[in-house]
Image (cartoon, rainbow, N blue to C red):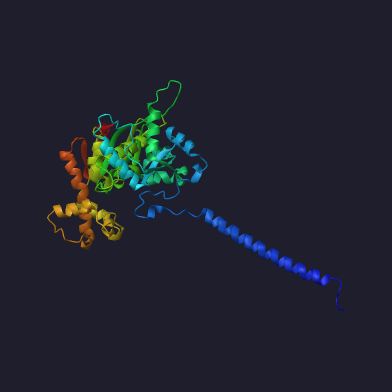
Amino acid sequence: MKENNGHAARRALSRRVGIVLVSFAVLLAILLAVKSHVRHKKPFSLSTRPHQPSRWGTRGRGGSMAYLSEAEVLEDILLAKLHLVDIRVEDADALQKASKASVTADSNTSYDHESATPYAGITGFFCTLDWSVHKLDPASTPMFRDLTAKSASCDGPRKMDLGKVVQAARERDSDINPRRVSSVHVLNLAAVVFHESRCGSTLVANILAGMNPAAHRVYSESPPPLHALKTVCGEDYSHCAKTISARILRDVVYLMSRSNDLKETRVFFKVQSLGSRNIEVFQQAFPATPWLFVYRDPVEILMSQLANGPRNANCVRPQRLHTQPTSVHRVWQHRGSSATTNLKTLSPEEYCAVHLATITETAVEQLQYGSQLQGVPINYASLKPMLLKRRCAVLT
């Protein structure tokens, strides 16, 4: 007999409701899985773009410091709890305008070069570096990128206007207030290491760190000094003058030399090999600071550079650029080579040799004829630990 009491209709309705609930549960599970994947996915970095020198990309407001206000971030910088790890030009027009204004102000005898900031449009990236990792075992973090990788807060550094931070830091450091007790002090810039690459410069940096781990802070190929030397103003200083580049370098080194560890007294920098092309600007910024130039038999350097194939060699990468570096053109022509020769047609070995020459010839020129004869050449062949320690001891 056909049921007509409503039970069949209720069972059908229950089945439909059950199907809807199951479907909703499946959809919810999918959404949660997608959300979890997105949350744990590594954020995109703008460092893959050639015009963005900073490796931090757009992550400047994330990580463990995301909850801090701008005022709190600045205060932590002034207390030397946060360290400068990179710089980037955010507004090239503002930088050029400020550079031109400072050139005009240079003729004014009342212009205070140290208190005024003759640049604008530059962003600094800040996070807390765990220096204990490097001091305990320099070989475990031989490069600055290794140190940032082992420093938790550097997953999400904060962005601040570099000029404003420098001005605030100088005002704080010059404020002599007996009521304010602070451990913040500026380390003595003991020496800077320049090199050709693949020549033992990392060993030199590690020895400088290991000679007195508690007192010495060593930056091994950190981005800010290199960007200040060559990237910000351009290789040919078309974006701003050498004097501006030198001032930015002084400010960058100043911020990176501030410490709240009373045991620290000296700071050392090992600059990337490309920075050796700009030793002149470094000497303009720090005329009284000693510097080392570590070099090696060029054939051995080329063999080391090309050991893993020409396409993987750092010295060959510029050859793939649309516009070749000015320094490469200059050396190529200086050697009597045809100015019409397309540098892209050179073999990897030839191009790598020209690249190396741009570094070596600049360093040799500054060693011989530099305005401040503070340079000390060190041959890779003589890098015996005891001998090197004695040479480094003279600097420290």
Q: Residue furthest left?
A: 336
Q: 113 and 75: which one is in front?
A: 113
Quadrant of residue 279 within the rendered picture: top left
Q: Which quadrant is home to the C terminus?
A: top left
Total tally of numbered discs in the picture: 0
User: Residue 250: x percent and y percent?
Assistant: 31, 36
Quadrant of residue 104 within the rendered picture: top left
User: Residue 103: x percent and y percent?
Assistant: 26, 38
Q: 28 and 140: which one is in front?
A: 28
Q: Which quadrant is home to the N terminus?
A: bottom right
User: Residue 243: x percent and y percent?
Assistant: 26, 39
Q: Residue furthest top?
A: 178
Residue in the picture at 37% in, 38% down: 163
Quadrant of residue 285 within the rendered picture: top left
**From where the camera sits, is residue 191 visible?**
yes
Q: Residue furthest bottom?
A: 1
Residue in the picture at 28% in, 41% down: 100
Residue in the picture at 23% in, 46% down: 277
User: Residue 131: x percent and y percent?
Assistant: 41, 38
Residue in the picture at 36% in, 47% down: 91
11 to 138, vertically: above or below: below
**From where the camera sits, is residue 383 visible?**
no
